[in-house]
Image: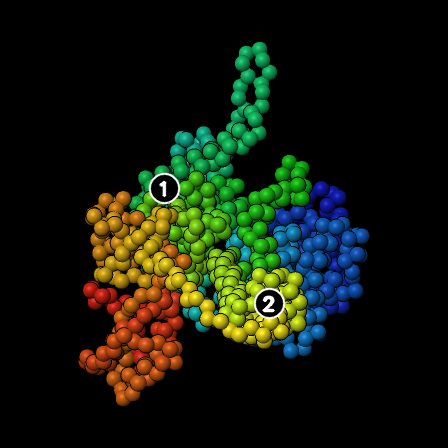
């Protein structure tokens, strides 16, 4: 408790008494219990409470930190905690403890339940509980941080498991909440146990040049302090300037070296200087002579202070750039465009007088508190406000709302945790709508992910995209700061090809849902038509026999469900025959009436050759140079006197036309989903020259009931080439066929060949 008292000294007497009482309550509950390290167990809850107090969390959170293990490990009940410390403390402690209890209950009910299932269920409950009160996860982060600091006493298997879970879930959560101080330490501690050899090697290499780096930093700090202190504008605008040096964290250095393939000497921001500015409060406007001064409107005052904060940051940046030479391309402005977790700072890398690259971070005191403590910084006591009063929409909206949606969309615990890791806790990009609103998406997202993030209807009807005013394929990888405009078509529908480049689980789920619904609708129509044709062929009264009430009775007899849809689905799937259904509907009529020849139906009018061009269904020809097929990303080119010609977006001719021709002649296009889209393609099957290769490839075609229009085989150098010309239903059909052929022993690749250009591309490849 000695470590906690100085941190709560400035709180009210009533709060200090409550925290002291919580300490005594927890100490008595854990009396005689020791940790794996041999220390008294009470040292752990006290350490958690210290971390929470250092983050400036409210007293209820600190008390919950002291009590977070009491319900799970002792005879204390939640009712005891609520009676002594209130409902808020109970809610936080309950969110911490019921998770593991639920996992234990599930384990008892299902002894075969794997450890990963138990962990997933545990994590799911924790994440769901977090949406009701985010303090639950902040207490959990403090708990996990202290456990990681004392992980050495655990067996190696547990060290690996806990470190991996920390790296995959808890460090990204700390980052998402903006608690940089916790995030960096969790990552470095996890790195220590997950990659011990790499950790020790990197730490040793940094230690050998530590004195040299510290000398560079001392010299740079001295010059920086002198230049900032002498600036007259800063002297007028700020109360305090804090300049300090820091070293980059080990995990950050390691991942940068791995990702960019760089040596340690090539990492420019190993050394960093942080400038923290405390702007002087703005004076209230002076009153006219003889009148009483009117205070400035609070909202105007707040906006003016934000402007002052930014002004002093940018002015300090100009001082740094006038002192030292900035490295081109190494400037990042997170003040104007904050990170999704609220982080704001200016980052620039400069060459110091010693010739060493140094990263300089410039931020205000408020920005620094947000960078270090994230959402906790918004909940520190200020002007007598209670924490519960400060939990505004900013902390509740965005990714927390998305977390709530995921719990309804995904029921399986493992899938839920995977979705959270992929969609919410991975790398992020911030992009803009045409109105200037920001959208926060996972790294690698495409315009399709953006469209579904804005609204499902926009995603379903997307046909093209413009990024920063230029047309791009829907598979384009979004970059920070991109402004995206989605081109839609009134009656547009998703393409199955989108699944190959959609990144967010939400977009992929909605695309799949559309096709599941479409397939169900087609199955119902097919089943209905099968029955109707059978009845008409036997000259039975269709309208009379296919009444809903009669069909419900038949469905009940044959499927056990009174829904006629189940009857149609069974007919479509071949589980029931039309004769069986007809005999159940009208056994006597079916026997009495001989089958009659029905007139041949008129052939359906084909819609081949029609595509959507900027939302309008339009006749178009396929370019012979690239022979686009359904599922390819396409664009339409206005051909003088001959209408539209469609090309693949990566077609060399299309690339040239986009560069050389007026933009209004190259227009976004998409396939008509209701048209017949079979195409003739040529495939080059490349493989090892061996006996029986051609026979094995043809066996695949026979198994898939495909009849090639042309077959040629030749040996060129060390490789055998089998040229196949055949009918394909589209990009997805082509991908399935290519995947099947690639399973043949000796096949190295399957390439799609253009009709005229002869340019080969991987069959089924998506445009990027």
Q: Is residue 90 left or right of residue 664?
A: right
Relative to 230, does residue 733 appear above or below in the rendering? below
Relative to 128, does residue 233 appear above or below in the rendering? above
The colour scheme used here is rainbow
Query: Disc 1 and disc 2: Cα gap in Å?
Result: 73 Å
Say which element carries label 1: helix
Pick the quarter of the image with the C terminus.
Answer: bottom left
Residue 566's mark?
A: 2
Q: Nearer the viewer, mark 1 or mark 2?
A: 2
Please state the horizontal and vertical placement of residue 409, each as a whole percent of the image.
58, 59
Q: Residue at x 64, y 65 (%)?
A: 550
Q: Is residue 501 left or right of residue 746?
A: right
Q: Residue at x 79, y 52 (%)?
A: 84
Pick the quarter of the image with the N terminus.
Answer: bottom right
Residue 394's mark?
A: none
Please state the horizontal and vertical placement of residue 248, each as a whole percent of the image.
43, 56
Question: In the rendered image, is residue 384 in sight?
Answer: yes
Residue at the outermost top position: 290
Please state the horizontal and vertical placement of residue 144, each as a whole percent of the image.
60, 61
Say which element carries label 2: helix
Please state the horizontal and vertical placement of residue 575, each as a whole percent of the image.
56, 75
Residue at the outermost bottom position: 691
User: Is 411 in front, or is 648?
Assistant: 648
User: Is 662 in front, or is 330?
Assistant: 662
Relative to 129, does residue 237 appear above or below in the rendering? above
User: If you read the primary sequence from the N terminus, does the residue marked by circle 1 or circle 2 appear first?
Assistant: 1
Question: In the rendered image, is residue 467 in sight?
Answer: no
List the residue tagged with mark 1: 320
User: Is 498 in front, or is 26?
Assistant: 498
Q: Residue at x 43, y 39 (%)?
A: 435
């Amino acid at each position: 408790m000695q470590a906690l008292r100085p941190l709560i000294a400035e709180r009210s007497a009533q709060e200090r008494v409550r925290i002291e009482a919580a300490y005594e309550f927890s100490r008595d509950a854990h009396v005689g219990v020791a940790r794996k390290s041999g220390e008294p167990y009470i040292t752990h809850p006290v350490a958690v409470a210290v971390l929470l107090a250092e983050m400036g969390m409210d007293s209820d959170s600190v008390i919950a930190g002291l009590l977070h293990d009491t319900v799970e490990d002792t005879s204390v009940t939640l009712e005891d905690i609520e009676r002594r410390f209130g409902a808020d403390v109970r809610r936080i402690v309950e969110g911490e403890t019921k998770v593991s209890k639920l996992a234990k209950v599930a384990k008892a009910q299902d002894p075969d339940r794997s450890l990963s299932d138990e962990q997933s269920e545990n994590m799911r409950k924790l994440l769901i509980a977090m949406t009701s009160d985010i303090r639950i996860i902040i207490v959990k982060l403090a708990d996990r941080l202290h456990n990681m600091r004392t992980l050495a006493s655990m067996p190696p298997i547990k060290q690996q498991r806990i470190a991996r879970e920390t790296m995959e879930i808890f460090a990204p959560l700390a980052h998402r909440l903006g608690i940089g101080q916790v995030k960096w330490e969790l990552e470095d501690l996890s790195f220590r146990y997950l990659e011990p050899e790499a950790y020790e090697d990197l730490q040793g290499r940094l230690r050998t040049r530590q004195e040299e780096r510290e000398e560079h930093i001392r010299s740079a700090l001295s010059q920086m302090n002198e230049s900032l202190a002498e600036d007259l504008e800063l002297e007028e605008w700020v109360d305090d300037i804090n300049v300090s040096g820091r070293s980059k964290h080990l995990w950050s250095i390691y991942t940068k070296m791995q990702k960019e393939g760089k040596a340690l000497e090539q990492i420019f921001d190993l050394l960093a200087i942080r400038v923290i500015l405390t702007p002087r409060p703005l004076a209230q406007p002076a009153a006219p002579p003889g009148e009483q001064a009117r205070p400035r409107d609070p909202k105007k005052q707040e906006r003016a202070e934000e402007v002052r904060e930014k002004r002093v940051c940018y002015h300090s940046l100009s001082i740094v750039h006038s002192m030292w030479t900035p490295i081109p391309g190494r400037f990042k402005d997170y003040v104007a465009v904050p990170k999704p977790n609220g982080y704001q700072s200016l980052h620039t890398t400069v060459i110091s007088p010693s010739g060493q690259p140094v990263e300089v971070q410039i931020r205000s005191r408020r920005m620094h508190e947000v960078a270090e403590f994230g959402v906790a910084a918004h909940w520190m006591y200020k002007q007598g406000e209670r924490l519960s009063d400060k939990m505004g929409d900013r902390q509740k909206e965005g990714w927390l709302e998305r977390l709530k949606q995921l719990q309804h969309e995904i029921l399986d615990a493992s899938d839920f945790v995977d979705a959270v890791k992929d969609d919410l806790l991975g790398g992020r990009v911030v992009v803009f709508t045409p109105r200037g609103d920001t959208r926060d998406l996972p790294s690698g997202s495409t315009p399709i992910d953006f469209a579904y993030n804005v609204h499902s209807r926009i995603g379903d009807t997307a046909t093209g995209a413009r990024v920063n005013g230029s047309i791009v394929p829907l598979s384009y990888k979004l970059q920070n700061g991109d402004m995206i405009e989605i081109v839609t078509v009134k009656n547009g529908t998703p393409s199955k090809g989108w699944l190959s480049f959609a990144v967010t689980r939400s977009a992929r789920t909605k695309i799949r849902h559309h096709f599941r619904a479409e397939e169900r609708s087609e199955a119902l129509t097919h089943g209905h038509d099968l029955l109707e044709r059978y009845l008409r062929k036997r000259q039975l009264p269709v309208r009379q026999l296919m009444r809903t009430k009669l069909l419900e009775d038949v469905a009940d007899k044959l499927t056990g469900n009174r829904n006629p849809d189940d009857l149609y689905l069974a007919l479509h799937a071949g589980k029931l025959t039309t004769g069986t259904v007809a005999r159940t509907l009208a056994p006597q009529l079916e026997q009495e009436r001989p089958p009659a020849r029905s007139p041949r139906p008129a052939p359906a009018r084909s819609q081949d050759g029609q595509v959507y061009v900027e939302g309008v269904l339009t006749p178009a020809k396929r370019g012979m140079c690239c022979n686009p097929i359904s599922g390819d990303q396409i664009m339409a080119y206005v051909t003088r006197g001959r209408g539209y010609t469609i090309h693949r977006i990566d077609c060399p001719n299309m690339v040239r036309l986009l560069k050389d021709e007026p933009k209004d002649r190259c227009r976004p296009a998409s396939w008509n989903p209701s048209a017949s889209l079979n195409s003739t393609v040529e495939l080059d099957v490349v493989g090892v020259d061996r006996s029986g290769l051609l026979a094995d490839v043809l066996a695949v075609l026979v198994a898939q009931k495909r009849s090639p229009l042309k077959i040629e085989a030749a040996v060129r150098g060390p490789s055998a080439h089998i040229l196949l010309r055949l009918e394909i239903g589209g990009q997805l059909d082509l991908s399935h066929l290519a995947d099947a052929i690639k399973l043949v022993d000796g096949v190295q690749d399957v390439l799609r060949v253009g009709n005229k250009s002869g340019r080969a591309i991987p069959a089924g490849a998506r445009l990027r």
